[in-house]
Image (cartoon, rainbow, N blue to C red):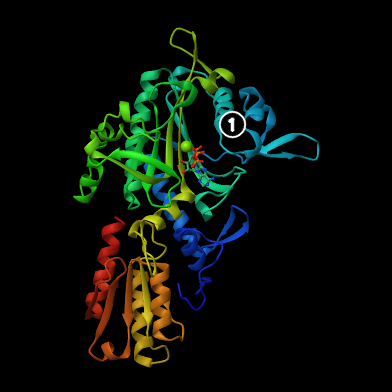
Amino acid sequence: MRLSTYFLPTLKENPTEAQIVSHRLMLRAGMIRQSAAGIYSWLPMGLKVLRNVEQIVREEQDRAGAQELLMATLQPAELWRESGRFDAYGKEMLRITDRHDREMLYGPTNEEMITDIFRNLVKSYKDLPKQLYQIQWKFRDEVRPRFGVMRGREFLMKDNYSFHADFEDAKKVYDTMYATYLRTFARMGLRAIPVAADPGAIGGNLSHEFQVLAETGESEIYYDAKFDELSANGQQPDPVALRELYAAADEKHDAANCPVPADRLKSARGIEVGHIFYLGKKYSEALNAVVAGPNGEQITVEMGCYGIGVSRLVGAIIEASHDDNGIIWPEPVAPFHVGLVNLRVGDAACDKACDDLYAKLQTAGVEPLYDDRDERAGAKFARMDLIGLPWQLLIGPRGLEKGLAEVKNRKTGERVEISIEAAFDKIVSSYQARHR
Ligand code: ATP
Ligand code: MG
């Protein structure tokens, strides 16, 4: 993509309405545009990141045996009357009346709708278990939408719903999802701590929130310092061990019953990026979702639900990865892998070297963002740092005389002057290492 034609409306000044760094940087980097409070349009570069995050979530859901579908955003009120949630949900639900005076709502979540699909189309225990997920926009009329896409009113969620003949099977899928979530967030360069959450009316200990540590997080969490030790050593503990370690973390800290020794207990603020939940028969009983068992008996199915805040993750990744100059994208979610910067547009040698590299990188499957605009070098550097692509490939007249290019790593700040061929190889091999 050539910057001269790309729709990338970056801002030099800090927008005053943004209170936290991710919101500020998303506006400044031209990723989003507010439509109304808590409602955003995603501009081309923001959408690329959103799609990358979404794709990682999708690949890990598929790997765990879930199947993707796409449910309607608008739902009939009757369905929610069956579960009793039409009245219970309160003002967060956006209610709509159609031209025939039928009551509708914009889905804040989809337990009722998926249970309705299931009860009408699945009749036998032989079809169990089933895990069905979607990545779809939700609407919740939050009292205080804030922090940009982190607490929006319209937001993108991955929601998976599972159906089982018995508790043991539900538990097995719950554990698989737990491990899947750790993998999913790790692939985005995030450390997410599973925190035992309040399972509400259902009881038991089968609800976990996944929290990314950040000063601007809205939840206060308590956790075992071992988590910091493991991740500081770059260790990827196996999920089961991790579970034993962090099951102790609890949002509502109860000092008297805390399983973590006091000298290892840490508290921090977290951003909730995912939530897994064993539902039991709450919805299957209310909506009568039954299948025929092996002896013809009726089985009310067990259910689980598993959510990930896909659009919130884009903000959370920035909260976790930025510096004073801008965003630092982890490679797997970066909108472009490399920014190719022509430092002297109009100079025949620079233009030729850049055009060649641009074409060669594209042929190698690496989509570069090519800054081909006639602008001073300082402004180009500032914009590249702001939008945070993992690599910058800088071509200027002085280096070029000696056949050299400069390669800058956005994260470490390390710059090396190497031959054009070596620079090309370095960019391509780092891309291939990330996108096998
Ligand atoms: P929160 O406690 O942050 O309000 P929640 O517990 O109501 O979230 P869930 O119903 O568990 O949210 O939804 C699943 C995921 O969707 C959450 O873990 C979160 O990442 C994301 N999410 C929820 N509400 C919002 C929102 N208003 N804006 C963006 N993402 C959201
Ligand atoms: Mg939650």
Using a 10 Å C-alpha cutoff, classify the residue at mark 1 as few (fewer than 14 neighbours), some (14 to 19) or many (20 or more). some
Q: Residue at x 47, y 58 (%)?
A: 20
Residue 147 visible somewhere in the drawing: yes
How many numbered marks does the figure carry?
A: 1
Q: Is mark 1 within 8 Å of ligand 1?
A: no
Residue behind mark 1: 113
Q: In the image, is 413 to the left or to the right of 71?
A: left
Q: Position of residue 19 (x, y in %)?
A: 50, 59
Quadrant where the image shows the C terminus: bottom left
Q: Residue at x 42, y 50 (%)?
A: 55
Q: In the image, is 222 to the left or to the right of 116?
A: left
Q: Position of residue 309 (x, y in %)?
A: 47, 45
Q: Residue at x 63, y 28 (%)?
A: 88
Q: Position of residue 280 (x, y in %)?
A: 46, 21
Give the quadrant of residue 42: bottom right
Residue lying at the far left of the rendered structure: 233
Q: Residue at x 31, y 27 (%)?
A: 256
User: As displayed, is residue 99 above or below residue 25?
Assistant: above
Q: In the image, is 104 to the left or to the right of 202?
A: right
Please name whichever residue, 366 or 242, is drawn nearer the observer in this view of the structure: 242
Give the quadrant of residue 402: bottom left
Residue 30 visible somewhere in the drawing: no
Quadrant where the image shows the N terminus: bottom left
Q: Position of residue 233 (x, y in %)?
A: 18, 50
User: As displayed, is residue 249 above or below residue 23?
Assistant: above
Q: Secondary structure at mark 1?
A: helix
User: As displayed, is residue 338 above or below residue 434?
Assistant: below
Amino acid type for the residue under numbered disc 1: Met
